[in-house]
């Protein structure tokens, strides 16, 4: 029920007195309620503008004596309009310096490709072999070979015996079988891919 509408039915001076009484008594009742749920208040307004017999959340709607007018109001009013957008806040302070990260794993450096050219062995004419060795301190990463002076390579005439890293891990070794009576090529070029590699 609209309190102001009820008060407007009385003399203006009585309305002002009733409004003051409503604020004082209502404020006291609000503070004493302590109930998180919205409370409903009832009171009796006399013709002289006095608000009395105030009760909070009664089980039944109270009765006002004589010619007093029953009025009620809620603790919470209707929602107000949405406020305006606030101004942009100032930028926050820079955060604290983070801890240094852990050292990364050592990388590879000193990349190089080493190559050598080898001839057919006079002691073992059926074999042509050799190795390409990395510079001191470097390790083998890979390798291979190619032939120089290829004459003719019938299927099965040349056999690869070894094409792999050497036992030391610092060279690339190649061994090929070639029939010296009908050689398929003249020389063998071996290459090794090397670099500094941390342990």
Image (tube, rainbow, N blue to C red):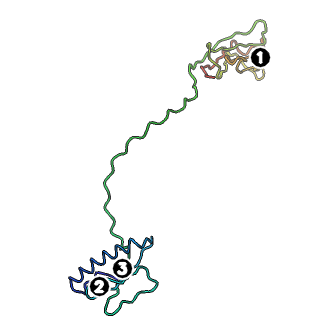
Mark 1 vs mark 2: which is more N-terminal? 2
Q: Residue 6's spot in the image, x, y percent? A: 29, 85
- The residue beneath circle 3 is 73
Q: Residue 120's spot in the image, x, y percent? A: 73, 10
Cα distance in 3D space between marks 1 and 2: 119 Å
Q: Residue 145's spot in the image, x, y percent? A: 67, 19
Residue 177: mark: 1
Q: Secondary structure at mark 3?
A: strand
Q: Nearer the viewer, residue 127 or 103?
A: 103
Residue 98: mark: none
Neighbor class of circle 2 (other Cα within 10 Å; few <14, some 14-19, many 20+) is some
Q: Residue 163's spot in the image, x, y percent? A: 72, 21
> Which residue is at 33% across, 69% downward?
80
Q: Nearer the viewer, residue 76 or 86?
A: 76
In this view, the residue farthest toward the top is: 122
- The residue beneath circle 2 is 6
Whether residue 141 sits left or right of residue 155 in the image: it is left
């Amino acid at each position: 029920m609209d309190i102001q509408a009820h008060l407007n039915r009385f003399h203006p001076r009585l309305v002002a007195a009733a409004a003051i009484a409503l604020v004082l008594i209502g404020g006291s009742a609000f503070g004493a309620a302590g109930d998180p749920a919205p409370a409903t208040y009832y009171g009796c307004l006399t013709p002289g503008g006095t608000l009395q017999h105030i009760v909070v959340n009664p089980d039944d709607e109270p009765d006002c004596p004589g010619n007093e007018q029953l009025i009620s109001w809620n603790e919470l009013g209707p929602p107000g309009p949405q406020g305006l957008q606030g101004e942009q806040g100032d930028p926050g302070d820079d955060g604290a310096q983070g801890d240094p990260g852990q050292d990364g794993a050592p990388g590879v450096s000193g990349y190089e490709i080493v190559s050598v050219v080898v001839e057919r062995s006079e002691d073992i004419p059926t074999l042509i072999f050799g190795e390409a060795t990395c510079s001191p301190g470097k390790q083998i990463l890979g390798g291979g070979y190619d032939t120089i002076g290829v004459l003719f390579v019938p299927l099965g005439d040349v056999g690869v015996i070894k094409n792999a890293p050497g036992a030391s891990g610092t060279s690339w070794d190649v061994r090929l079988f070639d029939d010296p009576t009908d050689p398929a090529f003249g020389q063998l070029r071996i290459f090794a891919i090397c670099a500094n590699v941390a342990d």
